[in-house]
Image (cartoon, coloured by chain):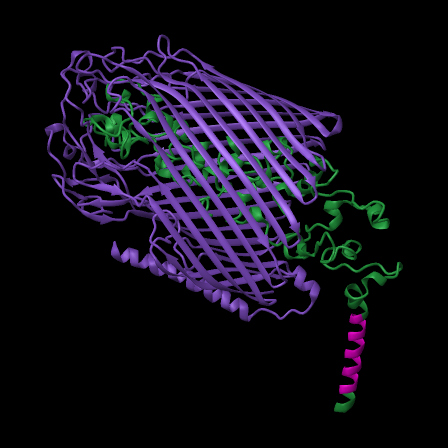
Chain colours: A green, B purple
Amino acid sequence: MLDNSKTAQIILSWLLAISFVIGILILPKYVFAEDLDDADPPQDLILKGDGKCTVCHDESSDNPILAIGKTKHGTTADHRTPTCTSCHGEGGNHEDTPHKAPMPQRTFGKKSVNSIEERNNACLACHQGGKRMHWSGSTHANRDVACTSCHTIHTEQDKVRNRITQPEVCFNCHKEMRQLINRPYRHPIREGKVICSDCHNPHGSAGPSKMVRDNVNDTCYTCHMEKRGPFVYNHPPVQENCAICHNPHGTTAPNLLRTRSPFICQECHEPNTHQGSSGTLTGAYARNTLARGCLNCHTQIHGSNMPENIRNESMFQR
Amino acid sequence: MFTATLDLRKFQYSIAFFTFLAATTSVYSSETNNDPVKELAKPRSVVNIGAGQLFNDNARFGQYTGLRNEGPYGIFNVDISKRYDDTGTWFKLLGRNLGLQNRDVHFEHSKQGNWGYFIDYSQTPRYEPFTVNTAVTGIGTTDPHIPTSPTTGNPAQLSTERHSIGFGFNKFLPGNLELHFHFRNEEKDGDRIFGRGNRLGEPRLSGFNGMPSPRAIGGFEFIPEPINSTIRIFGTTLDYVGKDLQLSGGYYGTMYNNKNALLTPVGGSTVGGIFSPSEYTPISLAPDNQSHQGFLSGGYSFTPTTRGTFKVAYTRATQTDTFTPSLFTAPGIGSNLGGRVDTALAQAGLTARPLQKLSINTNFRFEDRDDKTPVLFYNPMAAWHDDLNGNRWNGLNNPRSFRTITSKFEASYALPHNFRLVGSVDYEHRDRTGTATNTGHRFRTDELSYRAELRRSLSETITGTISYIHSDRFGSSFLTNTTGSGDPFFNLIAPSNLADRARDKVRFLANWDPIDSLSIQVSIDESFDNYGHRAGSDLGLRKGSARNYSLDATYTFSERLQATAWLSRNETHINQASRNAITDSGIREIWGANLHNIGTSVGLEVTAKPTDKLETGANFMFSDNTDKFNQKVTLEPQVNIVPNLTTQYSNLRLFARYDIRRNLGVRLDYILDHFKTNEWTWTGWRYTDGTTLTQDTNQMASFAFLSVLYSWQ
């Protein structure tokens, strides 16, 4: 049996030894990184094999990269997690002679010399399928949009995946929308309650305009399902495409109508009697312009499910 | 009803409370971390708690947030992210605007690459920006009481609110498979502007074809619509992700349930006898409906440069909501519509690079929306009796089916100096069923588009695109509009979505980085539409145009100071024509309208970090929108005028954040919001029951809030 003092000495010795070993292993990376001997392979900090990158690219470098550790790309317990070279290539020359060949094999920044396709292939090597199934052939792919045009990989907060900041990213290219969302009749886009990716899949879809569902109407129904019907009396453009009458990005006419009543209705309806009346704020036909316009009478404009037909139900009056 | 509202409020507070509890627990269980690498590489959690004061009541600033009434509001946001590095297990809790009415909570627990589940909650209010001054009572119920004569009322605020709860689960399975399941339940409650009305025409001696026309009859009544419905969306997907082949197949279902089938207003005006508003009861509301879809999509990489994708889906949507038994239905009409719409979708695409410099892209999409709802005589007498306008219709319900085929071919060729030349042809073919009654109809439309584009995507200084698109829409002959008795109706207008149209569009986009610290972006696009007409007529849409200009500049003064400024202008123009009703002197004047919409917006954003501990920022945006309704009317020009409509909106946001220590900071925010308009939509309008709608045309609101940020790892 050892007495207590010997036990304490042994424990202390072990602690010192362990501390020494840890100190040898860890400290140089932060304190003496520049003095590394060529014979000592740099130690990995986050990802497998990242030592040869992080030895230079620490947080004080022009291209800090350690924050990737905060992201899903930094979760090493997941066997699928990539390494630096999975995306950036081996970059042998870059590592060996950083001053002569300052770029790794594949870069993603503004000054990248790699083609967009080459850059995107690095992402698609893992992110093919699922919601990105239709990336190939999508408008964004065809217009040379790089994944990194929208996504930032080495940061904890990817702006485009945040509901509040996502529209700013989209507006970098879709500038007209920046104006439309500030019109008086709008979806709550500014509040982050309806955002671009609620309706559009930027990675492509089987629907038009990269709709998240297979067509415009089915996408609108995800929130406005009461418009689906079918009704006893259908209003044909409603069934065909909501966007015939509405601009979901914002308008100056109530209910996101592209143009005000009576003008929008007169783009289709025959001038039988009152249907052809000009816009006015006074007189008998003000009823077609003021308040809900034509909808003052034709209230069920999306369709009426009234089986009776004695009060102009087919004209959507009840 | 009150009890339900109370419970809902309790639920909202419970959500906020549990989020607070989770945040607190997480703070106390956090580890102290002195390892600099871990600090840089471990997920960080932040809690933000504070209070703010809203100055001035408003309708627009708080339309979707509930920040409408002057007073104090709570600030509470959490973003908790915890990862166990040894297992790759994540806990995430995101709570946004928990102290406000538009709160969101998202909780996620997952073992990355193995399994995961999430639960989320979202609350979205919408306040009607106009205040209703009404004597109508029972707002929010299905049997509102309507005054029988104009009555002065009291202010009422209409609003709706959505409460959504969702959850989902995913699990990776052997064989590169992943299973997903998702479910969302959304309750929408409240009330919105609605009404009923019948013509209130000025007296006419005679109507169409010499038929007598009712004189000065009917009226318009304010009937608030009660909203109390549920949307459910659910589905499951099985994904296969292989090196070359990826597949995704599953089920997607939706259900809509409206707790209000009919609106049965009580009272109302009886002036006008059978044409009076009170006769328009009950009023049908949106029926329950549901849909079920099975789908399979996939992609296959034939070679590193050749890939094909596809999707096939089949959807059955039904609407079999029971007609209220007390309603009169014609013989043979069942207890419900028997609505059924089957939609088949098939899509396939192929991208390839047959030559080093040549890329091609083709796509084909077929969608057949087949409305199989039985066609029945809902009003067998319709063809023998005039409607209120003196016309006769066929009394049938009118299901419509659509078949759409779109195809695309695009080729892109690499030129020297990183330029690419792109050419494409798009074709869209639409078939529609239906008949031509009171609007024009054609069974088929086709649209053919050509695009030529020159693009430069790779350059250290200038990248950009210039493109030209021309498209032509045409189709089958317009059917002759006929009434139910077979008589020809008017045949003067080619509806906007069916009319022949020639469209030319030019786009230009350039990104220029003249120096490292300056980035400039210029965007211009213009399009011109020319519409075709029905034979012998030039009514309907004639011409249209749209112009969008934008200029953006970002300047980096230093690592600590950046500024971005932008300007956008949008102009649209529509020229269209219609024809006024017949006057007592027998004149029907053709009149035209030039509708202009002009929008100008500017923005400026500055972010600065004067010291290591202080970060500040300012964001300003101003938007001006003007609608011009230039009508060319000869008869009664003093009456047929629609004044310009202008709306200005500006928003200024300032913030300053000071870090007291590494994990503790304070933040001061200030928002100034200004909305100004001369909108006349409800000005001068008074419902027959006396209801009016008003809004403050010059709304200025400011919101200042101070909060503490605490972060940990």
Q: Position of residue B234 (x, y in %)?
A: 45, 44
Name which residue lies at 82% across and 47% down. Answer: A94
- Look at the image and tell me whether residue A207 can be seen: no
Q: Position of residue B632 (x, y in %)?
A: 33, 19
Q: Position of residue B521 (x, y in %)?
A: 61, 36
**Which of the 4 image quarters holds residue A255?**
top left
Q: Position of residue B310 (x, y in %)?
A: 58, 30
Q: Residue B263: say if magenta.
A: no
Pick the residue in front: B26 or B67.
B67
**Which of the 4 image quarters holds residue B303?**
top right
Name which residue lies at 32% across and 16% down. Answer: B436
From the image, give the main secondary structure of the stretch colored magenta: helix
Pick the residue in front: B115 or A8.
A8
In this picture, residue B673 sits left or right of residue B284: right
B556 shown above or below A254:
below
What residue range appears in magenta? A8-23
Q: Residue A15: say if magenta.
A: yes
Name which residue lies at 51% across and 62% down. Answer: B667
In this picture, residue A99 sits left or right of residue A293: right
- Look at the image and tell me whether residue A174 can be seen: yes
B636 shown above or below A167:
above
